[in-house]
Image: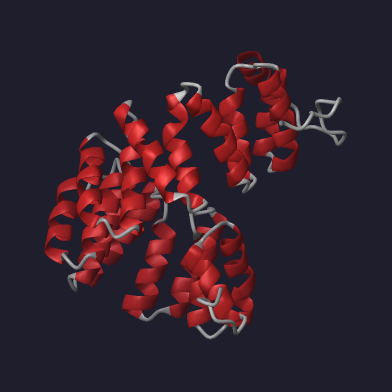
Amino acid sequence: MTAALPSDPLPSTSLPAAPADAAAALGRLSATGVALLDAGRTDEAVDVLRHAVAAAEPGADDLLARAYLDNGDRHAAVDLMGRLVAHGQVRFAGRLGVALAQIGDIDRAEEAFLLALEHGELAACNDYAILLTQENRFDEAAPLLRRAADAGDPQAAANLVELLYESGDLRAALQIAEHYADESRPDTVVALALVRAAAGRADEAEGLYRRAAQLGALRAHSAYGSFLFVVRGDAAGAEREFREAALRDEHGWQFTLGQFLVEDGRAAEARPYVAEAAALGDTEAVRLLAEIDGEDPYDD
């Protein structure tokens, strides 16, 4: 049974003003929820957006799902999106698959991704391929990534290059990276830099990493930092890039910076970043945190 909502639909603390045009398009509660999300007040946003859903405001379901995910409550997001998909709103299927994968429910995640693909959701190709890669099902993942890349998905080509590279097929990774490299999709420039570095063409790779950062690639600074640390042996330069990644809130920056600090012999300084990454569901961070704390990461 769903818990009763509080009688006052808005938090008691002062609320950020909702833009008038957003309020008109979304409805009063939803617009307020967006303003709270943008202000980083996710707990309050969840409360408001639950009322927006109850009031059947347009777009409230999407916003509540976002609020749950931003708040780190993946189980609540799964419950919400699962009910919506079960009632025929298949546009949530891809996002449901991602959330299910994040909580470790792999079988249901795969079902959700397949449903999304059945209904033409292109982004699900990339997300499903990531799941398959994590399950070491590379032969199934590669065609999905190629399909998404050919259709213009901004990250799929880069993920395909990374998949081929990590599977040990540098020649194929180079061919794919060169085929898809396109400055209008900056992540493909990062992918090309990765394989150029692996092929021993470090100067070319460094130029590409810098260009990718200028173009705004999603993880350009994190990737460039790793290059500087591993290939150039430049710990100071690497740290500068990792901290720039943090300032830009690049995906996974917490673990990347924390891992660097551990490898640089600064485990105590690394611990808060690794702990934050672990709290966000990063399984590698969970293992690294256990090692920092002197525990067996494989001891249940």
When asked about the image quadrant of residue 64, the answer is: top right
Q: Position of residue 75 (x, y in %)?
A: 59, 45
Tell me: residue 209, above or below residue 36: below
Query: Which residue is most to the front?
Result: 1
Is residue 11 shown above or below 292? above
- Work out whether residue 18 can be spotted: no
| Residue in front for this viewpoint, 185 or 57 | 57
Judged left or right of residue 60, residue 160 is left
Work out whether 126 lies above or below 278.
above
Q: Quadrant of the N terminus?
A: top right
- Residue 294 place in picture, x, y as percent: 60, 85
What residue appears at the point 52 percent right and 80 percent down from the top-left corner?
A: 262
Outermost residue to the top: 24
**Quarter of the image holding residue 52?**
top right
Residue at 21% x, 39% y: name it. Answer: 147
Tell me the residue at 41%/36% (across/down): 94
Q: Position of residue 96 (x, y in %)?
A: 48, 38
| Scheme by which the image is coloured | secondary structure
Given residues 221 and 299, the one toward you in this image is 299
Q: Answer with left or right where residue 9 lies relative to residue 99.
A: right
Q: Nearer the viewer, residue 279 or 255?
A: 279
Q: Nearer the viewer, residue 280 or 107?
A: 107
Residue 225 as seen in the image, left or right of residue 149: right
Q: Residue 133: which quarter of the image?
A: bottom left
Q: Is residue 55 left or right of residue 176?
A: right
Q: Residue at x 49, y 51 (%)?
A: 102
126 w.r.t. 255: above or below: above
Q: What x and y, as percent, mark residue 265?
A: 53, 86
